[in-house]
Image (cartoon, grey):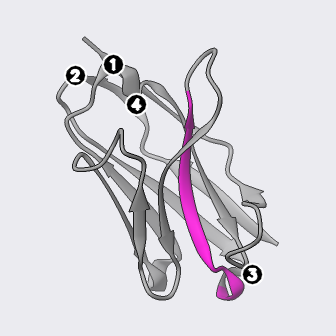
């Protein structure tokens, strides 16, 4: 199993930035990739960015390309999401998740961290 703990959310003005962190523990050596999801009130959860644990390959949702950057620090077992140029529509609970293989669903989830963007 993998345990995930997110931090770094908060209230920020539109145009501002935050850095979200996701600390992983447990069976992290077998993780294939990790991802950041978000869920806004009344909306379905959506993936915003992902990164492979070993090679660091990244992918992004179109809505966040050029504004969000996902990275990882393997030595600290931590994945980051730098969110820049925040918009009101970025307001959501942000979750990180992990999976063991490319074909697996994201199985392990953190508790989430709230990001609120004020206009």
Q: Which residue shows up at 24% across the image and 45% down it? A: 67
Q: Mark 2 or mark 3: which comes first in sequence?
A: 2
Q: Name the residue under label 3.
A: 27
Label 2 to label 1: alpha-carbon separation: 6 Å
Query: Which residue in the protein does label 2 denote?
Result: 14
Marks 4 and 2, Cα distance to the nearest angstrom? 12 Å
Q: What stretch is highlighted in magenta?
A: 29-39
- Mark 2–mark 1 contact, CB under 8 Å? yes
Q: Earlier in the sequence, mark 3 or mark 1?
A: 3
Name the secondary structure under disc 1.
Answer: helix
Question: How far is mark 4 from mark 1, CA to CA?
Answer: 13 Å
Picture quadrant of residue 33: bottom right
Picture residue at 53% right of the left edge, 80% below the top: 53
Which residue appears at 33% of the width and 19% of the height? 88
Residue 30 in the magenta stretch? The answer is yes
Tell me if mark 1 has few (under 14), some (14-19) or many (20+) residues whose alpha carbon lies within 10 angstroms of its own: some
Tell me which corner region of the image, top left, top right, bottom left or bottom right, holds residue 35.
bottom right
> Residue beneath label 4, please?
10
């Amino acid at each position: 199993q993998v345990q995930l703990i997110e931090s770094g959310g908060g209230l920020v003005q539109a145009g501002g930035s935050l850095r979200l962190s996701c600390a992983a523990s447990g069976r992290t050596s077998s993780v294939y990739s990790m991802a950041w999801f978000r869920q806004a009130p009344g909306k379905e959860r959506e993936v915003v960015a992902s990164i492979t644990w070993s090679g660091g390959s990244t992918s992004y949702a179109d809505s966040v390309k050029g504004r969000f950057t996902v990275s990882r620090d393997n030595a600290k077992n931590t994945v980051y999401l730098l969110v820049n140029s925040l918009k009101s529509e970025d307001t959501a609970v942000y979750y990180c998740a992990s999976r063991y293989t490319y074909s697996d669903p994201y199985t392990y989830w953190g508790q989430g961290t709230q990001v609120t963007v004020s206009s």
